[in-house]
Image (cartoon, helix red, strand yellow):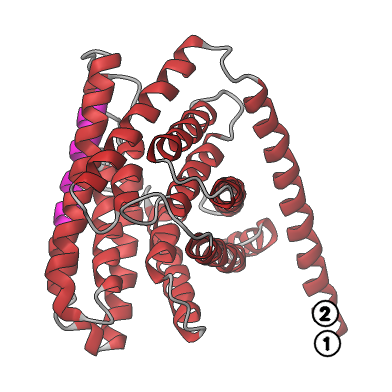
C-alpha cells in the first residue's frame, strides 16, 4: 500500500514538474514573439492578410445573418497559408471535409441521439479516423474536419434531431464564407504561388510501421468519449466548443516509438492550447468589458487580435499553436451574434466552457499516455 502511494505521489510530482516547465517555457517564448511585433515584414504581411480575411468573413457572415458568424471567421483564419495557391488548396480541403462531415453528421443525427451507446461508438470511431487520417494522409486536413464537423452537427442536434439538416447546412455555409474570404484576401495580397503538396506516409502500413499512429488514434477516441461523458454528466451547455477542442488537440504529432514522445507531444499541445485559449479569451473578455457599440471599432479589435495571433503562429520560437488557439478563443468569445455584443456574460460562459473542456482533456490525456518507465517495462516483457 505504501509502495503504491509512493508511486502515485512520484507520478504527481513528475507531471507537476513537467507541466510547470512547459508552461514557463511557453510564456517566455510567447513574450519574445510579442516583443518582435512589426520587426519582420513577411510576418507583418501575413498578419495583415489574416486580419483582412477574418474581418471580411465576419462582415459577410453578419450581412447574411448566419447562425454562427464566429465559425466563418475561424474558417477564414484556419484556411490561410503563406501563398495564394496554398490558401486555395487548404481552403478547398477544409471545405471538402466539412461537406462530407456535415452529410455524415446529418445522417447519424437521425437516430444516434436515441441510442447513446451507439452514439459513443460512432464518436470514438470518427475521432480515431480523423486523428489517424490527419497523421498519415496527404489530405489530412480534410479527414480532420470531416471528424470535427460530423461531431459538431451530431452534438448540436442532440436536443432536437429534427434540426440536423439546418445545422449541417449552416455549418457548411459558414465554412464556405470563411474559405472564400481567405482565398480573396490571400490572392489579393500574396498573389498566386503554388506550394508543393504535403508529403505523408499513407494508409498502407497502419498494422506495421504506422502502428503507433493507430494506438494514438485509439487513445484519442477514449479521451474524447471520456470528456463527453463528464461534460454531459455535469450538464454543461457548451458541448459544441468542447467537441471542437478535443478533436483538434488530440491531433498531436506521433513519434516512432509511440511512447513518452507522444505523451509529451500531447502534453505540450494541450498546455499550448490551454494557455492560448486562456490568453485569447481573457483579452476578449477585456474587450467585451469596454462595451464597445461601434461596429467599426469592434471589427477593428478583431483585426488587431488576429494580426497578433498570426504573428505568433508563424513565429520562430516554437509557440505558434499558442497564437492559433489565442486567436480561436478571442474570436469565439468576442463574436456572439449579429452585432457587437451588449453583454459580457455569454462570452464568460463560452470561455469557461472551452477552458473547462481543455482542463479535463489534458488530465485524461496525461493519464492515458504511458510514461517512459511503463514503456521500458512493456519492452522488457516483450523480449521475455
Give the prevailing secondary structure in the magenta stretch. Answer: helix
Q: Is residue 185 left or right of residue 371?
A: left
- The magenta stretch spans which residues? 86-100
Q: Is residue 83 left or right of residue 42?
A: left
User: Quarter holding the C terminus?
Assistant: bottom right
Report the front residue among 381 and 44. Answer: 44
Q: Is residue 215 above or below residue 278?
A: below
Q: Position of residue 90 (x, y in %)?
A: 25, 34
Report the front residue among 289 and 239. Answer: 289
Q: Is residue 244 left or right of residue 366?
A: left
Report the front residue among 371 and 270. Answer: 270
Alpha carbon distance from label 1 to label 2: 6 Å
The residue drawn where x is 77% and y is 59% is 16
Rate crowding at label 1 as few (under 14), some (14 to 19) or many (20 or more) other CA atoms within 10 Å: few
Report the front residue among 288 and 332. Answer: 288
Specify whether residue 105 is painted magenta. Answer: no
Rate crowding at label 2 as few (under 14), some (14 to 19) or many (20 or more) other CA atoms within 10 Å: few
Q: Position of residue 368 (x, y in %)?
A: 56, 67
Residue 5: numbered disc: 2
Q: Is residue 71 above or below residue 139?
A: below
Name the residue that disc number 1 marks: 1
Determine whether label 1 and label 2 are within 8 Å by CB: yes
User: Quarter holding the N terminus?
Assistant: bottom right
Amino acid at each position: 500500500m505504501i509502495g503504491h502511494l509512493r508511486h502515485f505521489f512520484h507520478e504527481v510530482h513528475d507531471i507537476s514538474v513537467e507541466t510547470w516547465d512547459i508552461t514557463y517555457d511557453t510564456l517566455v517564448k510567447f513574450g519574445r514573439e510579442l516583443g518582435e511585433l512589426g520587426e519582420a515584414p513577411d510576418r507583418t504581411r501575413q498578419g495583415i492578410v489574416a486580419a483582412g480575411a477574418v474581418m471580411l468573413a465576419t462582415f459577410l457572415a453578419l450581412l447574411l445573418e448566419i447562425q454562427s458568424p464566429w465559425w466563418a471567421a475561424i474558417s477564414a483564419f484556419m484556411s490561410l497559408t503563406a501563398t495564394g495557391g496554398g490558401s486555395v488548396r487548404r481552403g478547398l480541403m477544409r471545405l471538402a471535409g466539412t461537406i462530407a462531415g456535415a452529410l455524415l453528421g446529418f445522417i447519424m443525427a437521425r437516430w444516434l441521439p436515441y441510442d447513446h451507446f451507439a452514439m459513443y461508438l460512432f464518436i470514438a470511431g470518427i475521432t480515431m479516423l480523423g486523428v489517424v487520417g490527419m497523421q498519415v494522409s496527404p489530405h489530412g486536413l480534410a479527414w480532420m474536419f470531416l471528424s470535427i464537423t460530423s461531431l459538431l452537427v451530431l452534438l448540436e442536434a442532440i436536443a432536437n434531431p429534427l434540426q440536423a439538416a439546418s445545422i449541417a447546412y449552416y455549418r457548411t455555409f459558414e465554412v464556405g464564407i470563411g474559405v472564400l474570404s481567405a482565398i480573396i484576401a490571400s490572392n489579393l495580397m500574396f498573389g498566386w504561388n503554388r506550394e508543393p503538396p504535403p508529403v505523408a506516409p499513407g494508409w498502407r502500413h497502419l498494422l506495421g510501421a504506422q502502428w503507433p499512429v493507430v494506438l494514438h488514434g485509439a487513445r484519442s477516441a477514449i479521451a474524447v468519449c471520456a470528456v463527453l461523458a463528464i461534460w454531459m454528466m455535469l450538464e454543461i451547455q457548451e458541448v459544441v466548443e468542447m467537441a471542437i477542442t478535443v478533436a483538434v488537440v488530440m491531433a498531436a504529432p506521433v513519434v516512432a516509438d509511440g511512447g513518452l514522445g507522444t505523451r509529451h507531444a500531447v502534453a505540450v499541445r494541450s498546455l499550448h492550447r490551454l494557455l492560448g485559449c486562456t490568453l485569447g479569451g481573457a483579452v476578449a473578455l477585456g474587450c467585451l468589458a469596454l462595451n464597445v457599440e461601434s461596429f467599426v471599432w469592434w471589427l477593428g479589435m478583431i483585426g488587431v487580435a488576429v494580426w497578433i495571433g498570426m504573428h505568433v503562429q508563424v513565429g520562430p520560437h516554437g509557440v505558434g499553436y499558442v497564437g492559433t488557439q489565442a486567436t480561436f478563443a478571442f474570436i469565439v468569445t468576442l463574436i456572439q451574434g449579429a452585432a457587437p455584443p451588449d453583454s459580457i456574460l455569454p462570452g464568460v460562459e463560452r470561455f469557461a466552457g472551452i477552458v473547462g473542456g481543455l482542463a479535463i482533456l489534458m488530465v485524461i490525456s496525461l493519464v492515458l499516455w504511458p510514461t517512459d518507465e511503463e514503456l521500458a517495462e512493456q519492452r522488457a516483457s516483450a523480449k521475455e
